[in-house]
Image (spheres, grey):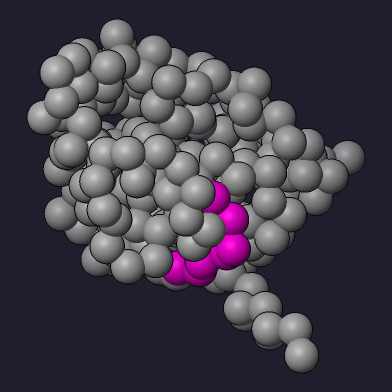
């Protein structure tokens, strides 16, 4: 019996919900009822995706949480900001996995390439600028990767620790409740057992597990 609450999973740019299957399986094993939401990340854009998510959220009364990978995390916060006192109350928690909440340097670099804005479509502006801060009632936790494997090197240097696509600094939005890094790449966040364990912990308690001790 699922007793952890209902979770809606959102994929990132250029992706589909198929990429969320490993994470969804681990959440179900932990007692959560899970659904995934596909959206058109380039042709539809953030506003349509947020509207679609709000419709899904309104269909669930009670314990509802959101988990978004990369762009999906930004979509989740956009939807909650629009909902405010709607169906998703302050008890609903959000986990963003590798989401460039403060804006993405890689996206800004790509936007200057020929065809770059076309590739990102209607998500370009949100990816480039991100959000100023989070001041909603919902607790937001962020899990960031720090294994530098990804296409970010092609687009330009990323400052500090990063997951190959998004820097850790770009995930540290003012107003979030908790933040953790795990040794995995941007896409690897969806496969990482540690990232899944941290997600489960935050959805249950509003806090992440203590960082793992380095092996002796």
128 left or right of 165?
Answer: left
Direction left: furthest residue: 112
Q: Quadrant of the N terminus?
A: top right
Labels in figure, total: 0
Q: Quadrant of the C terminus?
A: bottom right
Instruction: Residue 80: tell me if it is visible.
Output: no
Direction bottom: furthest residue: 216
Asked if residue 184 lies in the magenta stretch, the reply is: yes
Query: Quick check: 103 above or below 35?
Result: below
Direction top: furthest residue: 43
The residue depicted at 33 percent of the width and 25 percent of the height is: 50
x, y (%) of residue 67?
A: 53, 42
The residue depicted at 18 percent of the width and 15 percent of the height is: 115
8 left or right of 153?
Answer: right
Q: Nearer the viewer, residue 115 or 195?
A: 115
Q: Nearer the viewer, residue 134 or 110?
A: 110
Instruction: Residue 44: tell me if it is visible.
Output: yes
185 left or right of 88?
Answer: right
Asked if residue 159 lies in the magenta stretch, the reply is: no
- Residue interval drawn in magenta: 179-185
x, y (%) of residue 106?
A: 26, 42
x, y (%) of residue 99?
A: 39, 47
Q: Nearer the viewer, residue 204 or 209?
A: 209
x, y (%) of residue 185?
A: 54, 50
The residue depicted at 40 percent of the width and 59 percent of the height is: 162
Q: Nearer the viewer, residue 131 or 215?
A: 215
Query: Quick check: 212 above or below 10?
Result: below
């Amino acid at each position: 019996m699922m007793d952890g609450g209902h979770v809606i999973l959102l994929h990132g740019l250029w992706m589909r919900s198929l990429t969320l299957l490993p994470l969804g399986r681990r959440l179900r094993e932990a007692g959560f009822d899970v659904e995934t939401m596909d959206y058109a990340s380039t042709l539809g854009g953030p506003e349509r995706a947020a509207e679609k998510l709000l419709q899904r959220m309104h269909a669930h009364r009670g314990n509802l949480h959101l988990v978004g990978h990369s762009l999906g995390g930004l979509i989740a916060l956009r939807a909650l900001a629009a909902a405010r006192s709607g169906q998703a109350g302050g008890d609903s928690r959000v986990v963003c996995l590798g989401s460039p909440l403060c804006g993405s340097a890689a996206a800004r670099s790509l936007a200057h390439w020929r065809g770059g804005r076309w590739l990102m479509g209607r998500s370009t502006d949100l990816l480039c600028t991100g959000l100023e801060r989070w001041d909603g009632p919902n607790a937001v936790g962020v899990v960031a990767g720090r294994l530098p494997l990804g296409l970010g090197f092609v687009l330009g240097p990323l400052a500090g620790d990063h997951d190959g696509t998004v820097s850790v600094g770009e995930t540290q939005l003012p107003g979030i409740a908790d933040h953790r890094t795990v040794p995995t790449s941007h896409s690897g966040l969806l496969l990482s057992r540690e990232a899944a364990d941290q997600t489960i912990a935050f959805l249950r308690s509003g806090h992440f597990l203590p960082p793992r001790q380095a092996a002796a």
